[in-house]
Amino acid sequence: MSNTLDPHVASVLDQAGSDDEDALIASLEDSPAMDAFREQRIQQLHSEFTRAKAQKTQGFGNYTEIKEEKALMDLTTEVKCAVVQILPCVLAFIDGAVVDRIVGFEGLGYTPDTFTTKDLESRLLSSGVVKRQTTSTLYADKAAKKQEVETDDDDDWN
């Protein structure tokens, strides 16, 4: 950071010779550089205001509920409308390495309308990312939870 003053500020301070800060600030505000900056900022604000006004007349930022199919088709087929579609992607990792990649519903052999979570589960089981829980382990876990609940209930009534 330099300790030098702007040449315009230095000349105003040299000419002023007084300690009146208001007079010094007023003389600095009459700078041609400040006038140019002010004019540039006014032009920028004017163009921004014009753009915002044009967007408002086009309905920008408004939420409209479309109840008729014809109106929906008219809106989606207009040139100014862009439709963004998101393609689902699932990456399966084992120890930091990708072992399976499912992009879209084609990787499962189904269409989006007939896709179920069971299909995804079977794909993840076949790739080894998810391990099927054995029934004996499943029943042991349920029995342990049931025993825990029964002992907790007894403590509440004492």
Image: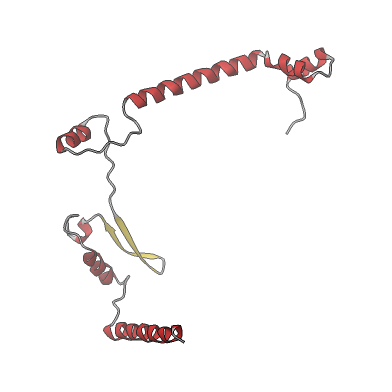
The single residue placed furthest to the left in the displayed view is: 70
**98 relative position to 103: left or right:** right
The single residue placed furthest to the front in the displayed view is: 158
Q: Residue 13 at what x, y percent from top left?
A: 80, 17
Is 49 located above or below residue 61 in the figure?
A: above
Which corner quadrant of the image does residue 153 belong to?
Answer: bottom left
Q: Nearer the viewer, residue 120 or 136?
A: 136
Which corner quadrant of the image does residue 11 belong to?
Answer: top right
Q: Residue at x 27, y 36 (%)?
A: 64
**17 relative position to 40: left or right:** right
Q: Residue 96 at what x, y percent from top left?
A: 41, 66
Q: Nearer the viewer, residue 140 or 10?
A: 140
Q: Nearer the viewer, residue 37 or 127?
A: 37
Q: How is the image coloured?
A: secondary structure
Which corner quadrant of the image does residue 113 belong to?
Answer: bottom left
Is 47 located above or below residue 63 in the figure?
A: above
Quadrant into which the N terminus falls: top right
Please count the marks in the image.
0
Q: Residue 144 at what x, y percent from top left?
A: 37, 85
Is 29 located above or below residue 90 in the figure?
A: above
Q: Residue 87 at what x, y percent from top left?
A: 28, 50
Q: Residue at x 45, y 20 (%)?
A: 47
Q: Residue at x 75, y 18 (%)?
A: 22
